[in-house]
């Protein structure tokens, strides 16, 4: 995938830089954040409707 330089703590206040191989795949987010927000709104509406049924 590639390489990355990271700072590694050593003994005491010193730190060294180390190059590591990146072996992970890039992360993709699906569904779109707007779809997640819409689903949360629908879930809140569902709970509100359940409350109305419970009190009615």
Image (cartoon, grey):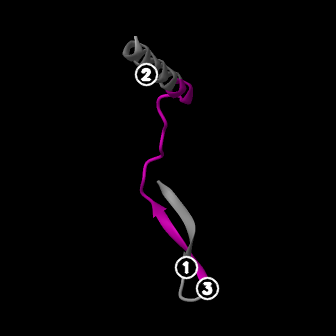
The total number of labels drawn is: 3
Residue span colored magenta: 15-37
Which badge, 2 or 3, comes first in the chain's sequence? 3
Q: Which residue is labeled 3 in the image?
A: 14
Number of other residues with Cα within 10 Å of mark 2, as a class: few under 14, some 14 to 19, many 20 or more:
few
- Image coordinates for residue 32, horizontal then vertical, percent: 53, 28
- Please, what secondary structure does the residue beneath circle 1 have? strand
Q: Residue at x 62, y 86 (%)?
A: 13
**Residue for point 47% across, 32% down:** 30
- Residue 5 shown left or right of residue 55 in the figure: right
- The residue that disc 2 covers is 47
Does the CB distance between marks 1 and 3 fall below 8 Å?
no
Q: Is residue 34 magenta?
A: yes
Q: At 53% across and 88% down in the image, what residue appears?
A: 11
Q: CA distance from mark 2 to mark 1?
A: 49 Å
15 sits to left or right of 35: right
* Element carrying mark 3: loop
Q: Nearer the viewer, residue 2 or 26?
A: 26
Q: Which mark is residue 56?
A: none
- Residue 12 screen position, x and y as percent: 58, 89
Q: Nearer the viewer, residue 10 or 2?
A: 10
Q: What is the spatial separation of the Cα atoms under label 1 and label 3, in whole angstroms?
A: 7 Å
Between residue 16 and residue 51, name the one nearer to us: 51
Report if the CB atoms under discs 2 and 1 are less than 8 Å apart. Answer: no
Residue position for label 1: 9
Secondary-structure class at tag 2: helix
Picture coordinates of residue 24, whole percent (x, y): 42, 53
Q: Earlier in the sequence, mark 1 or mark 3?
A: 1
Identity of the residue furthest to the bottom in this view: 12
């Amino acid at each position: 995938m590639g390489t990355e330089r990271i700072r590694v703590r050593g003994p005491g206040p010193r730190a060294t830089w180390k190059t590591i191989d990146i072996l992970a795949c890039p992360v993709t987010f699906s569904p779109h954040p707007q779809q997640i927000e819409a689903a949360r709104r629908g879930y809140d509406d569902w709970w509100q409707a359940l409350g109305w049924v419970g009190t009615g």
